[in-house]
Amino acid sequence: MSSQPRHFTDLSLVSAEDLRRILDDAKVRKAAQKAGTAEQPFAGKVLAMIFDKPSTRTRVSFDVAMRQLGGSTIMLTGAEMQLGRSESIGDTARVLSRYVDAIMIRTTAHERMTELAENATVPVINGLTDDTHPCQIMADVMTFEEHRGAVKDRTIAWSGDGNNVLHSLIEGSARFGFKLNMAVPEGSEPEQRYVDWARKNGGRLTVGHSPEEAVAGADAVVTDCWVSMNQEHRARGHNVFLPFQVNADLMAKAKSDALFMHCLPAHRGEEVTDEVIDGPNSVVFDEAENRLHAQKAVLAWCLSGAV
Ligand code: CP
Ligand code: NVA
């Protein structure tokens, strides 16, 4: 591995062209997997996965992705490693780089992930931090396009907390060229630096407090939990978020064929009602499935530059 590995840490740090190539490759790999013709280019390759937070989709989809690519994974939690006994992230990165071919990390402070990347000599993939969740947005764009065609110039609406998933969606709006209208409670806005970056890079975004205004004319309505992992200190109480719930009334104000999207896990009856998440326009399980296919292409981009 060269001393300058290809990290997948944030959508803002990968070019729009490469992100598009990754999604094109994801489509090919998904079709090949379904047809039983998928290749296994990563025999003998090992992905280490570090989890400082719980996970169902990220953990299983990366594990299955590596197996289907012919490789394997090692599952680690920070608490079980010397990392949990104050070994530095830098030294952990240097050591793991001597054993494995890539590292995926889900952690708390974003800087833990970037510090790992700065010190690793193998690719590091961001599997969610307090600040961003880029793999989720790759799967979401893939899912939107499977159902509705090119996302460029389409309108996506967000109703809910200004959280890590939204930050990556904001970066995605600039990278993939969709319009993003956000409705968040006052005091729960996304961090301004993401909005500023996106606007500087061609993103068309609005940030407001009215879900009805945000969803008007939207091709997809997206939400997420009211309280993210490790963000309990930002919890605002149900009354603050209830007006942002995605229910049938709100969906009726979007385009008639608007998709409903959610990274999962969902908190039914809070940010979304059963009738919406179980309704005909909900694609939440396709999003979950596409984590697998999109991440295979991310792994291929990181490991071989073959994308
Ligand atoms: N959407 C997502 O990242 O799910 P997990 O927390 O289950 O990995
Ligand atoms: N915003 C959520 C996403 C979970 C996949 C969280 O960080 O908990």
Image (tube, rainbow, N blue to C red):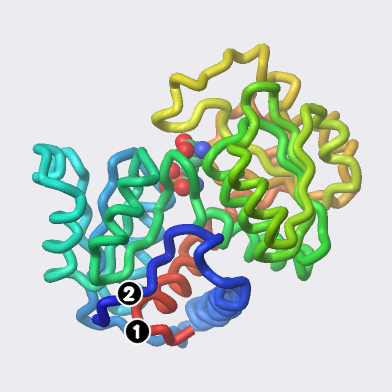
Can you tell me whether the CB of the residue at mark 1 lies under 8 Å from the nearest atom of ligand 1? Answer: no
Q: Amino acid at mark 1?
A: Gln
The earlier-in-sequence mark between 2 and 1 is: 2
Q: Nearer the viewer, residue 99 or 88?
A: 88
At x 39% / y 30%, what residue is drawn?
230
The answer to whether the residue labelled 2 contacts the one labelled 1, judged by CB atoms less than 8 Å apart, is no
Q: Secondary structure at mark 2?
A: loop
Q: Position of residue 258 (x, y in %)?
A: 82, 49
Q: Secondary structure at mark 1?
A: loop
Q: Is residue 4 left or right of residue 260?
A: left
Residue that mark 2 sits on: 5
Residue that mark 1 sits on: 40
Q: Distance from label 2 to label 1 (Cα)?
A: 21 Å
Q: Is residue 128 left or right of residue 81?
A: right
Q: Position of residue 131 (x, y in %)?
A: 48, 42
Q: Position of residue 135 (x, y in %)?
A: 49, 58
Residue 48 marker? none
